Image: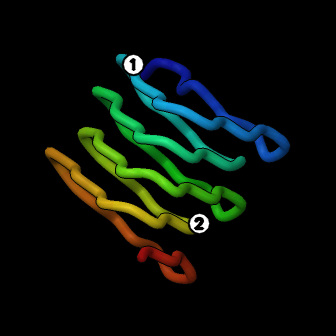
Amino acid sequence: MATPTVIGRTSFVHGRVSGDGDLEIAGRVEGDIAVSGEVVIDTSGLVAANVTGSRIVVRGAVKGDLVASESLVVESGARVV
């Protein structure tokens, strides 16, 4: 398994994020997210975006549409609007 791209706790991304592979979000993202692999939104992650990926795991907060081609997991304590 390849190492995911990580948006760290102190990072803020404003704009579209796209690419091949997996993505882990521990910081803030405002803008659409579309990747071919897994998207993990960590407990510290704050996302104001539509998220598309093969598998999406939400542990933090998301305001937007979630579209997963394989599976969508919303863990205990996560917030989705």
View extreme (right): residue: 10
Please indicate whether residue 52 sits to the left or right of residue 12 in the image: left
Badge 1 density bin: few <14, some 14–19, many ≥20, Cα 10 Å:
few
> The residue tagged with tag 2: helix, strand or loop?
loop
Please indicate whether residue 69 sits to the left or right of residue 72 in the image: left
Q: Residue at x 36, y 48 (%)?
A: 51
In the picture, which quadrant includes the C terminus?
A: bottom left
Place of residue 9 in the rendered image (x, y in percent of width and height, measured from the top left):
79, 46
Q: Identify the disc placed on residue 33.
A: none
In the picture, which quadrant includes the N terminus?
A: top left
Q: Amino acid at mark 1?
A: Gly
| Mark 2 / mark 1, whichever is N-terminal | 1
Q: Quadrant of residue 39?
A: top left
> The residue tagged with tag 1: helix, strand or loop?
strand
Place of residue 16 in the rendered image (x, y in percent of width and height, measured from the top left):
47, 30
Residue that numbered label 2 is attached to: 60
Front-most of residues 72 and 66: 66
Q: Identify the disc placed on residue 19.
A: 1
Q: Quadrant of residue 22?
A: top left
Q: Residue at x 34, y 33 (%)?
A: 34
Give the CA separation, mark 2 to mark 1.
22 Å
Q: Amino acid at mark 2?
A: Gly
Front-most of residues 72 and 61: 61
Badge 2 density bin: few <14, some 14–19, many ≥20, Cα 10 Å:
many
View extreme (left): residue: 69
View extreme (bottom): residue: 77
Please indicate whether residue 43 sits to the left or right of residue 58 in the image: right
Q: Residue at x 49, y 42 (%)?
A: 31
